[in-house]
Amino acid sequence: MYTKKDILDHFDPHLALTERHYFPAAAPHARAWHFWLDLEHGYQVTAGCRIHLYADEDRWAVVAEMRSYANRGFRAELNLYYFGNCIDYPLIEYPDHRSISNWHSITLIDGEELERLSKFDDEEKFETINPAAGTVLVRDQRVLIEPDPAKYRSLGIHYRNWAPHTDPEIHFSDLLRYLDATQPGLVQATEPDIREHIPPDLRKLMTIDAFHYTTVYQENHNPSEEELYQLIAQVLITRNPAEWRPTLPANNHWSNWESGYL
């Protein structure tokens, strides 16, 4: 059996990895990493996020999901962050080392496709969509690209106007945010995606689409004292989605946070 404190302690950023509950001891010479949902990531232009809760009497899992454009990785990706007492933590083999972490990434739009979308002679239009591209391949599905910047603006998506006195261009991150808003099923994690690193028979309690997020960069950041994590723990220990009763306003929309600025 697990307690509310067990769950909250797992999110404590002040614990060393070797002291963190449930996180496995890294294999010899393996580098260990433990990540949190970060809506202000300097290398990720955030497009959307959700939190998935799973539990039974003996096991619990929280999977945080973020869709984003990796501005240094040159790809659109789906990032999943795992927490719990039953996680099959991803172990990645590199030529010179091994890495274990609670993070799993799925490519939504790869670099080759983005390069095709940005076939411009003008280098100042780097990371912008060529109107002639027409479609984009998202995972294994090809969809039409909305070419009208006004459609993006109507959703609060601020396209970039790289050159004065010219028509505005649509940035890679704008495209992902537009797809996230208009075709969420295309870019959101599927249940098989999420369950890749949790037991297949673990009961799903709920998905949280809107929640109150607190920056992870403040000096006194302590998740165990935040309403979001307290409510998550309460839902898990009772296994009752009705315990999700937030009092703070939801602010996890990308427009409330600056990201991808590095």
Image (spheres, rainbow, N blue to C red):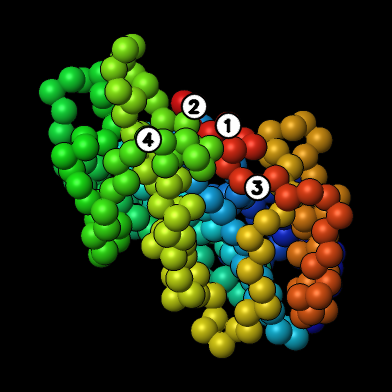
User: Circle 3 sits on which residue?
Assistant: 252
Pick the residue in front: 63 or 31. Answer: 63
Residue farthest left in this picture: 121
Specify the quadrant of the image occupied by residue 126: top left
The first of marks 1 and 3 along the sequence is: 3
Where disc 2 sits, the SS reads loop
User: Circle 1 sits on which residue?
Assistant: 258
Residue farthest top in this picture: 164
Q: Position of residue 129 (x, y in %)?
A: 26, 36
User: Circle 4 sits on which residue?
Assistant: 149
Q: Is residue 53 above or below residue 138?
A: below
Q: Residue at x 39, y 62 (%)?
A: 186
Q: Mark 4: which amino acid?
A: Pro
Q: Nearer the viewer, mark 2 or mark 3?
A: 3
Q: Which mark is residue 148?
A: none
Query: Left of 87 or right of it: where is 9?
Result: right
Q: Which mark is residue 261?
A: 2
Q: Mark 2: which amino acid?
A: Tyr
Marks 1 & 2, CB-CB < 8 Å contact: yes
Label 4 to label 2: alpha-carbon separation: 22 Å
Q: Residue at x 28, y 48 (%)?
A: 145
Label 1 to label 2: alpha-carbon separation: 7 Å
Q: Mark 3: which amino acid?
A: Asn
Marks 2 & 3, CB-CB < 8 Å contact: no
The first of marks 2 and 3 along the sequence is: 3
Q: Position of residue 2 (x, y in %)?
A: 79, 76
Q: Is residue 60 above or below residue 107?
A: below
Q: Mark 1: which amino acid?
A: Glu
Marks 1 & 4, CB-CB < 8 Å contact: no
